[in-house]
Each structure stands twice: as structure tokens, then as C-alpha cells.
């Protein structure tokens, strides 16, 4: 009987996109550096065509020995939005060395055991896609406790959505946690909450094409990935812990004005 091929040891590549936020991205870099994952963790920071950010991160390179910074210039036709973000996320997967991929947006951070809890969940459940719950924070780090769903086009819409999600147990008044409800598919998993096998992401990359109607409906790249995984009947598992600290008011790789045709995933709470 032939011996089974030996599996390579587990490791994680964390991919972060950044553009004009050299200070914020260093908070994310410190968060990755602090992870107590029990396996090798490498951090790949992709700078989206910002020489200023490249210079700032070069100055602190010695503080982050397990972090690789790559500068990615834009083509003349490229603008900020989920299409550009998806292309960078897919580039990160191709350059990754880890058996697992995690994403941390430059304005968010993780609890120190975020990756460890995701790896444990993935192993115990035997899945290629695990995710955490999310703790929402204001930009000053205080818990977001407003009875309004942050991703909406108006206050009225935000209040309606919050009531609907409260009825389903996705949110709880007085708490800042977005809770997982495995039978409720209304709320896609945020990119920064995922741990995904590299093999899976090579097979199911982030969608790079977005329409005007996607922009109108605030459809982002993490939305499309989530629903593609559901369509494929990929088994997903949640840790049940809010180890992602999600700061409201940002967009993962730009502070510039985004083309309205690509304006997705920008929170109502930031306006």
C-alpha cells in the first residue's frame, strides 16, 4: 500500500491592503505581529500605489521582521473600489506562502488569539473556511452601540435594518457584536473575519467585476465571495467569538473620493 503524501506544515499568510494610511496600517501590522497562533504567521502588506506610505513603512521595516511589503502601482484606468481591492486580494493569494490565508484591513485589528481560534475551529470542524464574529467600534475605539445598521444609505434604512437583524438575533441592543446565525444568510462574512485555505482561494478567487447596480446595493468583494462559497456548498464554520475589532468609518485601501460607480462597502456610520 502506497504511503500517503506528507502534508506540508500549517502556516498563515495575512494579507493587508493599504493606500493613504501609513499610521493606521502600522496598528494592523502590530496586531498581526502580536498573534499567538501556534504556527508560523507571515504578513504581506500590499501598498496600493502610494509612495508616501511606501516611505513610511520602509522606516519601520526592522520592527516587523515577518512582514513583507510590496508596492503595487496602478494602471491608468484603475480607480478605488471593490474591483481594485479584489485584484489586490487575489494578488496576495498568488504571492502567499501560507497554507491558510487571512485578511486584515488596514483600519482594523484582531484579538491576540484571533488566528489561533480560527485554526482550532477549522481543524475541529474539518473545513477550509472559518470565520469569527465581529465587534464594532467607533473610530476612537469605543463600542458602537447605536441602534442603526452601519452599512446603509440613510438613517431610516439603517434603523429598519437594525430592527430586522435584532429580531433575527444578529445584533443585540446594548452590544456591539455582530453575531453569527448559521441559518441566516443576510449578513456576509467580513473579509477581516475569514481564515481560508489558500487552495480554496485559488479555486474561488475574489470577483473582480462589479456593476453600477452592485454599487447602488452596496455590494462589496466580501459579499460576493461569501455568496459564491454558499452557492458551491462549501462548508463554513464560525468560532462564535468576536475576535475581529472592526473600526467603523473606513475603506480598506483608500481615503480618496471613490468613483460612484464603484462606491461600495463604505459605511453609513462614516458619513
Image (tube, grey):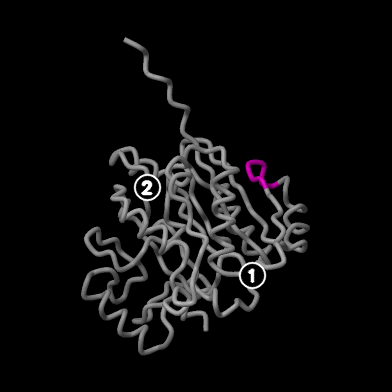
Query: Which residue is at the far bottom?
Result: 156
Residue lying at 74% horizontally and 57% vertically, measured from the top left: 54
Q: Is residue 59 left or right of residue 32?
A: right
* Residue 71 x %, y %: 71, 54
Would residue 36 be found to the left or right of residue 28 on screen? left
- The residue at which mark 2 appears reads as 129
Dot 2, crowdedness within 10 Å: few (<14), some or many (≥20)?
many
* Mark 2–mark 1 distance (CA, rounded to whole Å): 30 Å
- Magenta range is 63-68
Give above or below for 193 relative to 212. above
Secondary-structure class at tag 2: strand
x 36%, y 86%: residue: 157
Q: Position of residue 58 (x, y in %)?
A: 76, 52
Residue that badge 1 annotates: 79
- Asked if 52 appears above or below 39 in the picture, the reply is below
Where residue 197 appears, as percent x and y from the top left, is 43, 42
Task: Give the farthest residue toward the top.
Answer: 1
Is 149 magenta? The answer is no
Q: Earlier in the sequence, mark 2 or mark 1?
A: 1
Amino acid at each position: 500500500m502506497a504511503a500517503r503524501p506528507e502534508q506540508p506544515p500549517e502556516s498563515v499568510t495575512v494579507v493587508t491592503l493599504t493606500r493613504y494610511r501609513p499610521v493606521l496600517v502600522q496598528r494592523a501590522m502590530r496586531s498581526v505581529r502580536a498573534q499567538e497562533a501556534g504556527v508560523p504567521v507571515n504578513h504581506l502588506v500590499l501598498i496600493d500605489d502610494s509612495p508616501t506610505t511606501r516611505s513610511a513603512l520602509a522606516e519601520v521595516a526592522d520592527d516587523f521582521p515577518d512582514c513583507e511589503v510590496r508596492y503595487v502601482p496602478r494602471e491608468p484606468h484603475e480607480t478605488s473600489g471593490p474591483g481594485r481591492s479584489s485584484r489586490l486580494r487575489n494578488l496576495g493569494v498568488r504571492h502567499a506562502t501560507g497554507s491558510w490565508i487571512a485578511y486584515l484591513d488596514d483600519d482594523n485589528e484582531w484579538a491576540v488569539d484571533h488566528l489561533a481560534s480560527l485554526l482550532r475551529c477549522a481543524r475541529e470542524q474539518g473545513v477550509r473556511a472559518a470565520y469569527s464574529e465581529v465587534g464594532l467600534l467607533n473610530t476612537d475605539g469605543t463600542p458602537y452601540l447605536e441602534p442603526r445598521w452601519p452599512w446603509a444609505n440613510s438613517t431610516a434604512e439603517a434603523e429598519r435594518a437594525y430592527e430586522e437583524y435584532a429580531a433575527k438575533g444578529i445584533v443585540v441592543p446594548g452590544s456591539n457584536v455582530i453575531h453569527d446565525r448559521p441559518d441566516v444568510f443576510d449578513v456576509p462574512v467580513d473579509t477581516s473575519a475569514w481564515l481560508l485555505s489558500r487552495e480554496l482561494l485559488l479555486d474561488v478567487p475574489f470577483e473582480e467585476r462589479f456593476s453600477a447596480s452592485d454599487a447602488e446595493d452596496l455590494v462589496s468583494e466580501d459579499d460576493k465571495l461569501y455568496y459564491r462559497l454558499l452557492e458551491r456548498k462549501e462548508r463554513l464554520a464560525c468560532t462564535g467569538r468576536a475576535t475581529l475589532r472592526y473600526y467603523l468609518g473606513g475603506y480598506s485601501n483608500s481615503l480618496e473620493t471613490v468613483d460612484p460607480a464603484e462606491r461600495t462597502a463604505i459605511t453609513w456610520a462614516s458619513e
